[in-house]
Image (cartoon, rainbow, N blue to C red):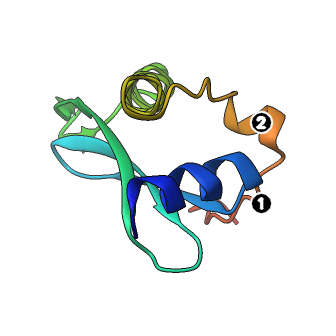
Amino acid sequence: MTREEMYAALMAGQVVLGIELGSTRIKSVLLAQASGEVIATGGFDWENQLEDGIWTYHLDQVQLGVQESFRKLAHEVQLHYRIQLRRPVELQLPVWGASGES
């Protein structure tokens, strides 16, 4: 896609936001819905902690990492396309997930 086509996809809301909670890094990627091409990325480095013999991550670090990763992605969009992204909640994005609780 050309830069102009990516700009048009952003303006039309034809994008997909992916967030990965990896073992050492939280990654955000914004893709053009039609082509799957990367428009922007963001990331946050983090480390797990050994507590009571269990390797874990604190939920406040998850929240901070997702917010920071998205902030960096939004900054990249602002720099390259001069578009101010809103928070994902305001965009009413669908949410999929899993829980280890039963």
Q: Residue at x 84, y 46 (%)?
A: 92
Which comes sooner in the sequence, label 1 or label 2? 2
Vertical relation: 64 (above or below) 99: above
Q: At 51% across and 25% down in the image, what residue appears?
A: 82
Instruction: Compare residues 99 and 54 and report the one nearer the observer.
Output: 99
Classify 85 as above or below 60: below
Q: Locate the N terminus by quadrant.
A: bottom left
Q: Is residue 94 above or below residue 62?
A: below
Q: Callout 1: few (<14), some (14-19), or many (20+) C-alpha neighbours within 10 Å?
A: few
- Which dot marks residue 89? 2
Instruction: Report how many numbered discs are placed on residues in the image.
Output: 2
Where residue 78 appears, as percent x and y from the top left, is 47, 24
Q: Is residue 57 left or right of residue 30?
A: left
In this view, the residue farthest toward the bottom is 35
User: Residue 97 appears at what percent x and percent y?
Assistant: 63, 63
Looking at the rendered structure, the kind of residue marked 1 is Pro
| Residue 74 position in % (x across, y down) | 48, 29
What amino acid type should be assigned to the residue bearing mark 2?
Val
**Quarter-wise, where is residue 61 in the image?**
top left
Secondary structure under the numbered disc 1 in the rendered image: loop
Left or right, residue 78 beside residue 95: left
Does the CB distance between marks 1 and 2 fall below 8 Å? no
Q: Quadrant of the C terminus?
A: bottom right
Q: Nearer the viewer, residue 64 or 47?
A: 64
What residue would you read off at disc 1?
94
Q: Position of residue 12 (x, y in %)?
A: 75, 55
The residues tagged by marks 1 and 2 sit, at their Cα atoms, a distance apart of 9 Å
